[in-house]
Image: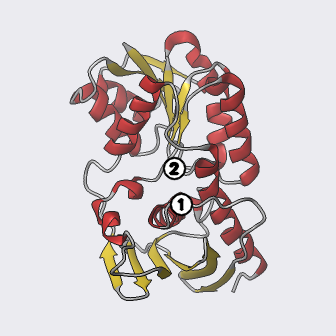
Amino acid sequence: MLRIGLIGTENSHITHFTRFLNVEERHPGVRATALVGGPSPRNQELAELGAIERIVQEPADLGDEVDAAIVSSRDGGKHLEHARPLLEAGKAVLVDKPLAASVADAQELLALAERSGAVMLSCSALRFVPELSDFAASQETGRLRHLHVSGPADPDSEYAGLFFYGIHHVEAALEILGNPTVAPGTLEVRTVRREDTVVAWCEIAGTQVTFTFLTPGEGTRTPFHATAIYENAAVSRPLTLGGDYNAPALAEFLQAVEDGASPRSPQALLSPVVTLCAITESLERNPS
């Protein structure tokens, strides 16, 4: 049996992973067996939901009791701290979006995985929505000229600002663009903030890209959406997350564990963080 430890249990995604693995048993031979964060009411709830007997305080306390881990901490700034002991031990880790909230942390995570030979994966659920297939350029559409991705994200979020939701915009855009490498220091970004809206403009792989981040209101949240302008066509689609939106990332991770290798290159894992860091740095320079 592949034993998985769950870290960052405050995140509702952990409920999904517990349901997929322990309640519905979608992946025979794989089970969530430990929770990190101590005996909190939230962990007691998850323990009852998934019949999970082991609750520990810190990620390092998982020791040899798990074979892999899922890090879902809401604050991407904590992902390096939470994943480090697992990666150093050579255990596979699924880092729920974002991989990290800084380029330095992302690079350190990648270095840890490389040194230990551990499988590490991170990806937004928007990479798997069926609407993305509608954006494939063809002879009929011509070359993609401009891409606009919009959706909810709060630059003042306590969970690393735009990274909490904004990583979805960036990963969806990179998926549509064919996952080009965005190296640190190569992206020029212009941003404007007006009240609850942040707009960022940049060029990625020869395509003009616009991101619009709208701060969620009380009980309201702007849906994700993408519009692509081609030489001969325009495509506009909502990017819809269904109830099981975390299932494809989990399935990809478990396949990577079985294969012993991540399907996403280090450059592919780093590029979203590089892109969003460039956006947030531009916003810091031009806050209004």
Kindly identify which numbered label has been placed on residue 167.
Answer: 1
Residue drawn 53% across the image and 81% down it: 196
Q: Is residue 212 left or right of residue 80?
A: left
Q: Which quadrant of the figure contains the N terminus?
A: top left
Q: Residue 121: x percent and y percent?
A: 52, 39
Disc 1 or 2, which lies upstream in sequence?
2
Q: Can you see residue 37?
A: no
Q: Amino acid at mark 1?
A: Ile
Q: Which quadrant of the figure contains the C terminus?
A: bottom right
Q: Quadrant of residue 44?
A: top left
Q: Residue 30: x percent and y percent?
A: 34, 21
Q: Amino acid at mark 2?
A: Lys
* Residue neighbourhood size for the residue with mark 2, other residues' Cα within 10 Å, grouped as few (<14), some (14–19), many (≥20): many
Q: Considering the numbered disc 2 on the image, is that residue within a helix, a strand or a loop?
A: loop
State whether residue 130 is above or below residue 189.
above
Disc 2: which residue: 97
> Are the residues tagged 1 and 2 within 8 Å (C-beta)?
yes
Q: Residue 273: x percent and y percent?
A: 64, 56
Residue drawn 57% across the image and 86% down it: 195
Of residue 224 and residue 208, the one placed in the foreground of this image is 208
Q: Residue furthest left?
A: 24
Residue drawn 35% across the image and 25% down it: 47
Q: Is residue 73 left or right of residue 133?
A: right
